[in-house]
Image: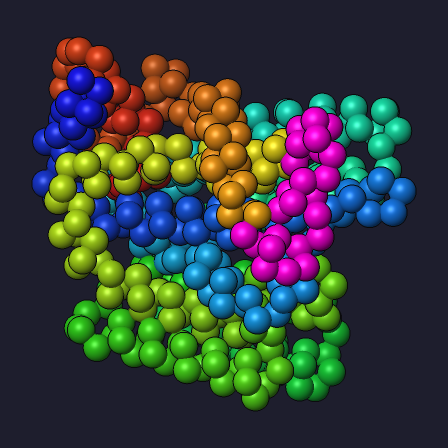
Amino acid sequence: MLLRDVRGLAARIDAATPADRDRSVDALRALAILGVVLGHWLVTALVVGEGGELKAASPLAFTPELAPVSWVFQTLAVFFFVGGRVAGRSWAAAGARGTGYGTWLGRRLARLFWPVAGLLALWTVVLAALLVGGAAPRTVHTLGKLALSPLWFLLVFAALTAATPLVARLHPLWPLAVVLHVDLLRFGLGGPAWLGWVNLAAGWLVPYTLGGLRVGGRTTPWVLFAGGAAATAALVLWAGYPAAMVGVPGAEVSNLNPPTLAAVTFGLAQCGLAMLLVAPLRRVLRRPAAWAAVALVNLFAMTVFLWHQTAMMATTAIGLLAAGDLPGLHTAPDGTGWILARLLWLPVFALALAVCWAAFRGYEQGPRAGRGGRRGRVVRVHRPGGAGERAAGRVRGGAGTRATGRA
């Protein structure tokens, strides 16, 4: 009975989806979000240090040969690539409707930052309670940094979104040249370390502008994929860049904070691969069940992204209070045993994230349309009937342009 209801819901979502919708955009966004979540869960550990303080650790610091794991799960370039494509189309559609820049930007930023309200409210209370309760400053700093770390991404993404009308016609080679020269000054000529933060905007502007660029032909994705991969390999092997594409505690140089040239060339390879996946994804997403799953992930993508670190930390804290040090949860990530144990904890993290989703999913919807806002829709509006139709209606009302790439 349940299976039949699920199939029926999937069929209704599929039937109500506009025929001209590019479902591959939604799939790429979902893959990027899930990649970030799984990557953080696999390479971030909380361990108890001297004096009972909690500190962050990474298996990559103990086992550098695990660096290829970061190549699979560091998918931020794909998210910026999709974001550039979506924002460019949205801005063009807004212009065609006569919508002003302020109105267009306000709607897009509201979709980004409305879900942040719940996260900030909860963690303000938690961190204040920890300080009042006498928790070690390092513990408070570690927990706060992990919980609020997703916000840096939103700030950069918001800035690029605001600049969409200016960068819509910008060729990716320009910001790529900026990253190249910044790294040359930093690493080659001994320039100041702070100069690297110029790449926080320039580095992510490369995939963002690439997403908005109309790329034709079959060779371009292969050139990006092969050229980006070759350039990254050369930078790691011969130029001294770290092999890990994520930050590693204690490492002298991080490829991600701020982005380096290696991170950007790696992102170009990812964007090329994303382009190559478009056609296969479109074929797969013709299946109602596959499309319904992607639509639902996009519906609450921001909630998943913002709360996944909180879910991991909540599991860690509850486990520590209930059972003490548990393998893969509180122990040092210093070997394959920890990796195997951590894999067993992933379903528990997912369950904790589901609890966060149930508690805070309302923030994903933002102000109701009846208050003057306008919601985009994953599927066409039709009159809801039974329970399955009501569920499809929630997909219609919530995923909006976050999931579609429509204005």
In this rendering, would 86 be left or right of 172?
left
From the viewer's perspective, is residue 188 above or below residue 275? below
**Residue 284 located within the stretch drawn in magenta:** no
Colouring convention used in this rendered image of the protein? rainbow
Residue 334 visible at all: yes
Q: Residue at x 35, y 65 (%)?
A: 271
Residues in magenta, as a range: 316-340
Residue at the image point whose x is 22% and y is 58% from the top: 278
Q: Nearer the viewer, residue 334 or 394?
A: 334
How many marks the image carries: the answer is 0
Q: Who's the residue at 18% across and 73% down the image? A: 218
**Residue 306 vertical placement versus 84 (above, below):** above
* Residue 336 counted in the magenta span: yes
Drawn side of residue 390 relative to residue 154, left or right: left
Residue 371, percent across and down?
39, 16
Residue 310 location (% of width, % of height): 60, 35
Q: Quadrant of residue 80?
A: bottom left
Looking at the picture, how far across and down is residue 331, in whole percent?
Answer: 70, 48
Where is the C terminus found, in terms of image quarters?
top left
In the rendered view, would you say 308 is above or below 47?
A: above
Residue 258, percent from left and from top: 62, 63
Q: Residue at x 36, y 24 (%)?
A: 373
Q: Residue furthest top?
A: 386
Q: Nearer the viewer, residue 171 or 361?
A: 361
Locate the N terminus and report the quarter of the image it occupies. Answer: top left
Vertical order, 223 against 79 (above or below): below
| Residue 154 seen by the camera | no
Would you say 122 lies left or right of 252 here? left
